[in-house]
Image (spheres, grey):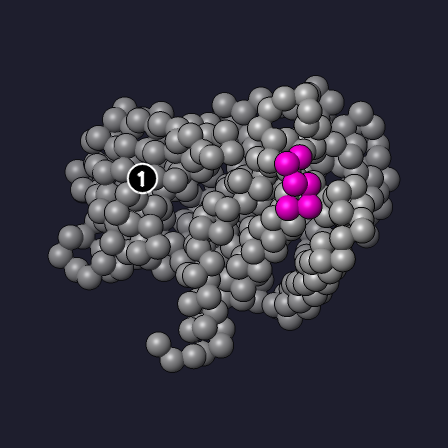
Amino acid sequence: MEDFVAWIERHCPSSIRGKRLSYSGGSKHKMPSPEFESWFDACVERGLTVPEWSKEHGGAGLNSDEAASFRSAMEVVGAPLPLFGLGIAMLGPTIMEFGTDDQQKRHLPKIARGEVCWCQGYSEPGAGSDLASLSTRADDHGDFYLINGSKIWTSGAYKADWIFCLVRTDQSVPNQEGISFLLFPLDAPGITVRTIDLINGGSEFCEAFFDDAKAAKNDLLGDLNGGWTIAKRLLQFERASVSRGEFLPRGGNLPAALKKYAADDFAARNNVLCIEMDDAAFQLTKRRAKQEAMSSGTPTFATSTFKFLSSELESRRLDAITAMAGTQGLGWSGNVFTKEELKTTRSWLLSKGFLIAGGSSEVQRNIVAKRVLGLPD
């Protein structure tokens, strides 16, 4: 097995090690720095932006143990993740499972090289947790589909190049049976994207409006009217990525906050201990589940358990920090607050949305009850 630590030390500039840098690829995201770009280019050349993907798809062809070794080596060196996003975490694995050879050849290498940034078109103003009631429609016009409708809470749409989208292609059958899964570019005529101002001051979530937008027939993923099965599989990949902490807000260190703000507070110490113990148990559970599921190679419904626990734990962690900090944990601006305190406040506000995004905690509980524990409806 290759010495990944030595390889990373050769190719990851020391100036970016240990820093929170991120890059989602595509035409609208800028490289964090020239040094990061050098690191990114080295990873692309070796296929290490997606180490477990095949070389044909732009990856390194590593097995799960080798990929885990590479990620551990990045942690040892302090190298930032070279590339992340919905294309890698969610759509790529879905295309591998359901896509045609042509779709895999056209889309997967571009994802691996960071050439295209993707967003997810699922929720609608009248179809959130009840996603099967979506009404955005795609009508067959011979060589293409014509799309009309809208999506909401579409993360990162304003900086995305393409969207993977659930659309209704048959109005005459029960909800789940008439849904298809389409891929199409967001710069096509008839598409308007608007950002939504969030409580944390950001605008990551968006609305997308489709007015006679076109989607090519060869970018229908899977069977016509068979999109519901694909949508559920992709959500498993999404929940797996959320449970790994890839899309959750991070702000502040819990033990450090305890020492700084509430070292002599017994109730605060007890709360921090409970959160840290629960998180340690969660990490061990994920490790055990990964080993048990390694033979299958795809996420199971246990990802709903992990998504629920990861978002709830992160929310509890940030709740505890802001509570211990008192008024210093509620800063929005001003030099009386440190940069870390301001960041923690905004992460705390954003974390509330992650109890809903990717399937609310209530939805995850229902999935776990039915699909994992086998409880009756």
Q: Main secondary structure of the magenta part?
A: helix
Question: Which of the 4 image quarters holds residue 240?
Answer: bottom right
Question: Which of the 4 image quarters holds residue 103?
Answer: top left
How many labels were placed on the picture?
1
Instruction: Assess whether residue 324 is covered by the magenta stretch.
Output: yes
Return the x and y of residue 197 as percentages of the image width and height: 42, 30
Question: Which of the 4 image quarters holds residue 172?
Answer: bottom left
Q: Residue at x 39, y 40 (%)?
A: 153
Q: Residue at x 26, y 47 (%)?
A: 126
Work out which residue is located at the far left of the displayed protein and give it.
172
Q: Is 43 located above or below residue 225 in the figure?
A: above
Q: Residue at x 35, y 55 (%)?
A: 129
Q: Is 50 located above or below residue 205 in the figure?
A: below
Return the x and y of residue 257 as percentages of the image width and height: 74, 44
| Amino acid under disc 1 | Lys
Instruction: Assess whether residue 34 is covered by the magenta stretch.
Output: no
Q: Is residue 29 left or right of residue 371?
A: right
Could one spot residue 243 in this view of the protein?
no
Q: Is 159 located above or below residue 283 in the figure?
A: above
Q: In this orientation, which residue lies closer to the viewer: 93 or 73?
A: 73
Q: Residue at x 42, y 73 (%)?
A: 370
Q: Secondary structure at mark 1?
A: strand
Could one spot residue 222 in this view of the protein?
yes
Residue count near mark 1 (Cα–Cα under 10 Å), binned few <14, some 14–19, many ≥20: many
> Which residue in the structure is indicated by mark 1?
151
Q: Is 140 located above or below residue 264 in the figure?
A: above
Which segment is the magenta one? 323-328
Return the x and y of residue 308 as percentages of the image width and height: 53, 59
Report the quarter where the C terminus lies.
bottom left
Q: Is residue 211 left or right of residue 291?
A: left
Return the x and y of residue 132 as percentages of the image width and height: 28, 56
